Image: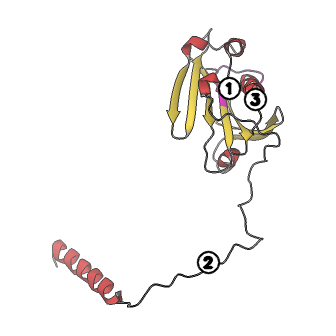
Amino acid sequence: MKPRSAISAVMGGVILLVAGCATTVTGQPVPTPISPASSSEGPPPRLAPAVRAPLDARGIKACDLLTASQLAELNLDPATAEPKTVGVTDNCSWAYMNDPGNVGGVQLSTRPRLPALDGIYLLRGTTKTFEPMEIAGHPAVRADAGGADCTIYVGIANYQGVAVGADTAGRPRADACAPSRRMAEMILSNLPPLR
């Protein structure tokens, strides 16, 4: 059998199979009642710790999360702010004053579909480094490739989060996460309580 004939035979068999399964139903459709969810059902279990003192970053752009003086303390140049929106995240990066080829940055998410840190916990095991921690009373986790760079994800509120990172250009530091932790502390200190 030629390839085209084989394809025609298979497609013909699929059409006959589908046609043989079709039936005609007459009458009026009757809705099927849906039983209410039992009390044992509910939202899925949380993967990450809940945020005990939620803050609110809604309406704040990522480039506005840190003041000019805070950026200077972090050695980031406020004039180099580079905003960018990717999906549901609002991002901003700044060049280091003493090393313009490297950047520090934030990624803000105030519209996730699941609790902010749960998305990171779902990736557990896919990153070299996964270290739960707490920053200024907020649940956080370092999840990255390890080494000299450090990315920390912080729960601002249960459905709001921020990722902070500092690029060290591969230069080792005694504490690779010190700049990222400090950036996260500053951001949290600038945010109002969630209402």
The amino acid at mark 3 is Leu
Query: Where does the image place residue 143, in percent across and percent down from the top left?
Result: 68, 39
- Residue bearing the label numbered 2: 34
Q: Determine the CA span between mark 2 and mark 1.
A: 54 Å
Amino acid type at image mark 1: Ala
Q: Position of residue 106 (x, y in %)?
A: 63, 28
Label 1 crowd bin: few (<14), some (14–19), many (20+), radius 10 Å:
some
Tell me, yes or no, whether the highlighted magenta stretch contains residue 190: no
Considering only order in the chain, which callout, 1 or 3, is on the residue closer to the N terminus?
1
Per the image, the residue denoted by label 1 is 148
Considering the numbered disc 2 on the image, is that residue within a helix, a strand or a loop? loop
For mark 1, give the secondary structure: loop
Q: Main structural element of the magenta stretch: helix, strand or loop?
A: loop
Residue 28 lies, with reference to residue 147, above or below; the image says below
Q: Quick one: SS at disc 3? A: helix
From the viewer's perspective, is 68 left or right of 39?
A: left
Give coordinates of residue 26: x percent, y percent.
Answer: 38, 91
Measure the C-alpha gap from mark 2 to mark 3. 44 Å
Q: Residues within 10 Å of mark 2 (few under 14, many from 20)?
A: few
Q: Are marks 3 and 1 in contact (CB under 8 Å)?
A: no
Kindly identify the amino acid type of the residue bearing the numbered disc 2.
Ile
The residue closer to the viewer here, 164 or 175, is 164
In this view of the protein, can residue 56 be seen by the observer? Answer: yes
Q: Residue at x 75, y 49 (%)?
A: 48
* Farthest-out residue, top: 98
Which residue range is magenta in the image? 164-175
CA–CA distance in space, label 3 to label 1: 24 Å
Q: Is residue 40 above or below residue 174?
A: below
Mark drawn on residue 188? 3
Q: Residue 129 vs residue 32: left or right? A: right
Query: Depth-wise, is mark 2 or mark 3 nearer the camera?
Result: 2
